[in-house]
Image (cartoon, grey):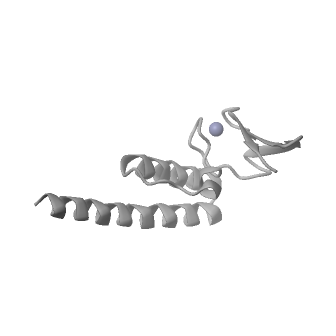
Amino acid sequence: MRKRIIREKGRVREVARERIQRLLDLADGAPLERADRYTALAGRLAQRHRVRLDRETRQRICKGCRGHLRYGSTARVRLTQGVRVVTCLRCGRITRIPYP
Ligand SMILES: [Zn+2]
């Protein structure tokens, strides 16, 4: 019984992962207000189902407003010594990402 529950959980997570991926793919091509909705949904799904997003994906979602970070239009990127500074132009949240 317990085993079955665990297996089903894995299945649910698998579906969630697929949905998240699909939402984020859609967000890339969508107009901005829809892209925001897609990323917000994807972020919430990830949280609810404890799906870890890969680094690249995580960096496309603003941690402040959960909006879609589109470099050049909704996000400003500045490179300083060893740090990539991404500023969300809508909520002002700053994310610092080290790079080699
Ligand atoms: Zn933001």
In the image, farthest residue toward the right: 81
In the image, farthest residue toward the top: 92
* Residue 77: quadrant of the picture: top right
Query: Would you say 11 lies left or right of 33 here?
Result: left
* Residue 19: quadrant of the picture: bottom left
Task: Look at 59% across and 51% down and name the residue there.
Answer: 58
List x then y, in percent, for residue 45.
Answer: 41, 52
Name the quadrant where ligand 1 sits. top right
Image position of 64 with respect to 10: above or below: above
The mark tally for this picture is 0
List x then y, in percent, for residue 17.
Answer: 43, 63
List x then y, in percent, for residue 87.
Answer: 75, 38
Query: Would you say 36 lies left or right of 69 here?
Result: left
Task: Look at 46% across and 51% down and name the residue there.
Answer: 41
In the image, farthest residue toward the left: 1
In the depicted view, which residue is nearer to us: 56 or 21? 56
Image position of 65 with respect to 30: above or below: above
User: Quick one: quadrant of the N terminus?
Assistant: bottom left
Task: Look at 59% across and 39% down and name the residue there.
Answer: 63
